[in-house]
Amino acid sequence: MTTMFDRFRDVLDGPLRVRAEEGSSKVMPIGEAVARFVRPGMTLHALSTTSRPNAILYEVMRRFWGKAPRFTYVSISLTGTAPVMVWGGLIARAITTFCGDSYPTPGPNPVFTRAFLDKTLEIENWSMLTLPLRLKAAAMGIPWHPTRSIVGSSMAEENRHAFRLLPPEVSGEARADFENDDETVGMVRALEPDLSFVHAWAADPAGNALLAPPYGEDVYGALAAKEGAIVSVERVVSSEFLRRNNHLVRIPSYVVRAVCPAPYGSHPMGISNRGVPELEAYAEDYAFLNELRRAAKSTETLDAWAKEWVLDVPDHEAYVRKLGFDRILFLKGKADGDSWMPELAELDASIDLDAPPSSIETMIAVAARRIEQRCRAEGYRTILAGVGASNLAAWLANARLRESGFDNELMAELGFYGYSPRPADPFIFNYRNLPTCKLLTGIETTMGIFMGGKNNRCVGALGTGQVDRSGNLNSTKIPGVTYLVGSGGANDIASSAREVVVCAQQEVSRFPERVPYVTSPGRRVRTVVTDLGVLEKRGEGDDAELVLTGVFPDGGADLDALARRAAERCGWKLRVWGDLAIIPPATSEETRLLRLFDPRRQFLGRQDPP
């Protein structure tokens, strides 16, 4: 008996057949892709998720080293290998949010500082949310995208070519749709790169590419680029493999110019495998990053580093061989969610859990208490922190809140939501925290909605280079003197979180009466905790200023002496508000948690001398 399937077999097995492999192959070596598609003067975008397209960037460095190609380089952060690109004369202009070193502690990089002062590098500063929004606008084919961020900052003034405030009559109409929303709204101009570089977990030969979450800035730059994207991959897979994991495919083949096999192509950064267990993750190579950070301190050592790791390495395959099996195996193991346990056991003998608290530990513990107090008082349900001491304060506050049964979730910029920080590594984006997340997403959702949206219930915790009497923060630059690091997500947090708690070591140069550059306006900064005491905002509107409300005990010093010390290390006439409180130092419970989070004391610093 002839069935319907028999009658239509030629069609079912022909035009309607789902093929395991589809599309024309774009697979080629990285060297060929760079030679064919990268030209001097281009605006190049490097996509940032938990992975970075470093294998492609190394090849660009090999091909254009010392040739002054005058690239404009677009990336949410110039860190890792980016100083080497600047040193090699490749980048004339950077459009970014962070320009410096990120590990083990954030700070200025001497290569960027020299280039900034010599005016050989132009840095266009944005925030962690506004730069992806510019790329998203270009991908959508619209000229502008609305935002709350950077309003009232120095970035708004500097970037007048690409930032506008909504006219009052328009923003008034928009505000009418949102009860009690009287904030000024800005717009950022679309940013369209020439070419985008991406490192993905996998792609089929045609270029449909799979990226594992969290998604960081997301794929807008690749979708916006005029000439498409070069995609390096850990593995080239079949179209059938992508169909099985189609919920993670983020880049369609039609925007891809080349698919370049490059196992470990994100190194020295890592790559996540969340959602695709058959693919192996590997963590960031902290030792490698520290070696590069040390090399950047002098021209001789950076020349030697560039020669060893870039110029004398002919291709990516040789680079992987140079890394070696043992190093790669270690990084794979470090990406496992439980790898903190043997690391903490190894560090156990060096952790003094019973030593008295240092001034930095007390600063962090008191900031955590203030965050906890504000969460309880105002019903804040999420905390989003910057890197460093402020992040440890957020971790400590969240741990105490959850232990007491108060619902509260930690978030991190790149798309972490609801994570429980693991001991042994205080770096905010460390891979051990990924398996503990309740949700993985990207910057636009985390920063733009969970932290900055209408229904957010988020308190921000920030560090800073400088803070002034109005609570304005500067982490970008002292014009004419030095470049710091930029905003990262700080401006977005200060612009949109319900309120902000700041951690900062107190000295005159870091507490000027008025910061010379406003990275983050201080309108939501309510509390500044220093290593000397607590400053709180008092007054209304433009008259509101930070005043001293509490001090930390110091031996037998009386209140007057403690207040004088705080005033002497402040760049404005610091007022004492009401009855000055003596604030208890960090408790043993608080210090024990902090020392487990940061056993190497990367952010806790040295113990105070006896």
Image: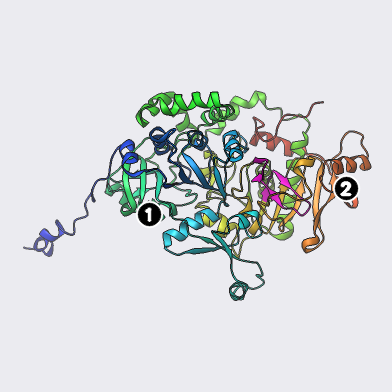
The residue at 40%/37% (across/down) is 60
**Residue 411 appears at what percent x and percent y?**
59, 50
Q: Judge whether residue 471 is colored magenta.
A: yes
Q: Which mark is residue 226?
A: 1
Q: Residues within 10 Å of mark 2 (few under 14, many from 20)?
A: some
**Residue 93 appears at what percent x and percent y?**
51, 45
**Would you say residue 422 is visible in this rendering?**
no
**Would you say residue 537 is visible in this rendering?**
yes
Q: Which mark is residue 157?
A: none
216, 141: nearer the viewer: 141
Q: Earlier in the sequence, mark 1 or mark 2?
A: 1
* Element carrying mark 2: strand
Q: Judge whether residue 381 is colored magenta.
A: no
**Residue 238 appears at what percent x and percent y?**
27, 45
The amino acid type, in three-letter code, at marker 1 is: Lys
Extent of the magenta region = 461-483
Q: Which mark is residue 581?
A: 2
Q: Name the quadrant of the C terminus.
A: top right
* Element carrying mark 1: loop
Residues tagged 1 and 2 counted as in contact (Cβ below 8 A) = no
The amino acid type, in three-letter code, at marker 2 is: Ala
Q: Residues within 10 Å of mark 1 (few under 14, many from 20)?
A: some
Left or right: 331 as drawn, with respect to 349:
left
Left or right: 261 as drawn, with respect to 3:
right
